[in-house]
Image (cartoon, rainbow, N blue to C red):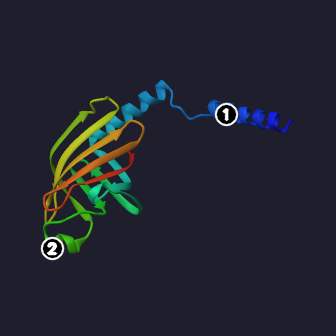
């Protein structure tokens, strides 16, 4: 008898989860795509970073306020750095903290059609960075940072428009 009650409760729980799931409708997906396209084309978006891949491929969960923010033709990055550097001044500096105008900006749809790829270059006082950003329709985002005097880094987070 206890087994039947347990199985019944489990069945009800599974049915309730499927009924109240937060799956997006086609209309909601279409609206999100339009919002994302407008924000990307205007160059007004922000990625709040919660994970990164450091040197040797180790994934690091971050606790702090780290971000990449685009405002038209300028960008601001406040990011941790867990890698190797070729310049002693940069090693002492620590993370990446840059706010400057960008150059060589390009925007295109992802090959799978599930978001947008944005590439640009930005310089600081000590080095320049090639940045490749992917913002997905579901709000997820990742980007790769290719510094001129440090090892490459990958970052993951959530895009806000």
Residues at badges 1 and 2 in contact (C-beta under 8 Å)? no
Q: Residue furthest right?
A: 1
Tell me the tag on residue 102: none
Q: Is residue 41 visible?
A: no
- Up the image or down, 87 lies above or below 23; here it is below
Instruction: State the residue position of label 1.
Output: 14
- Name which residue lies at 23% across and 53% down: 145
Relative to the observer, which residue lies in front, 111 or 135? 111
Could you classify mark 2 by the number of other residues whose Cα lies within 10 Å: few (under 14), some (14-19), or many (20 or more)? few
Quadrant of the image occupied by residue 114: top left
The answer to whether residue 118 of the structure is visible from this angle is yes
Q: Nearer the viewer, residue 2 or 134?
A: 2
Task: Label 1: state its secondary structure.
Answer: helix
Q: Which residue does the numbered mark 2 point to in the structure image? A: 88
Residue 64 percent across, percent down from the top left: 41, 64
Q: Secondary structure at mark 2?
A: helix
Looking at the image, residue 120 sits to the left or right of residue 69; the answer is left
- Residue 157 percent location from the top left of the image: 38, 50
Indicate the position of residue 100 as horizontal and vertical percent values: 19, 58
Locate the C terminus and report the quarter of the image it occupies: top left
In space, the residues marked 1 and 2 are separated at their CA atoms by 57 Å
Question: For the N terminus, which image quadrant?
Answer: top right
For the residue pair 3 and 59, the one nearer the viewer reads as 3
Residue at point 17%, 61% (across, down): 150
Residue in the picture at 59% in, 34% down: 21
Q: Which sits earlier in the primary sequence, circle 1 or circle 2?
A: 1
* Label 1 environment density (alpha carbons within 10 Å; few <14, some 14–19, many ≥20): few
Using the image, determine if residue 124 lies above or below residue 155. Answer: below
Q: Position of residue 97 (x, y in %)?
A: 25, 64
**At 24% across and 41% down in the image, what residue appears?**
118
Asked which quadrant contains residue 89, the reply is bottom left
């Amino acid at each position: 008898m206890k087994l039947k009650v347990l199985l019944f409760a489990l069945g009800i729980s599974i049915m309730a989860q499927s009924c109240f799931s937060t799956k997006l409708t086609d209309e909601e997906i279409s609206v999100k795509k339009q919002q994302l396209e407008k924000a990307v084309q205007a160059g007004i978006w922000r990625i709040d970073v919660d994970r990164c891949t450091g040197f040797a491929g180790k994934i690091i969960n971050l606790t702090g306020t780290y971000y990449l923010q685009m405002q038209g033709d300028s960008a601001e990055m406040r990011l941790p750095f867990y890698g190797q550097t070729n310049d002693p001044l940069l090693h002492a500096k620590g993370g990446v903290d840059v706010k400057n105008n960008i150059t060589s900006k390009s925007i295109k749809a992802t090959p799978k059609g599930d978001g947008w790829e944005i590439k640009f270059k930005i310089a600081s006082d000590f080095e320049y960075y090639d940045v490749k950003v992917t913002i997905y329709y579901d709000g997820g985002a990742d980007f790769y940072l290719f510094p001129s005097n440090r090892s490459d880094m990958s970052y993951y987070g959530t895009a806000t428009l």
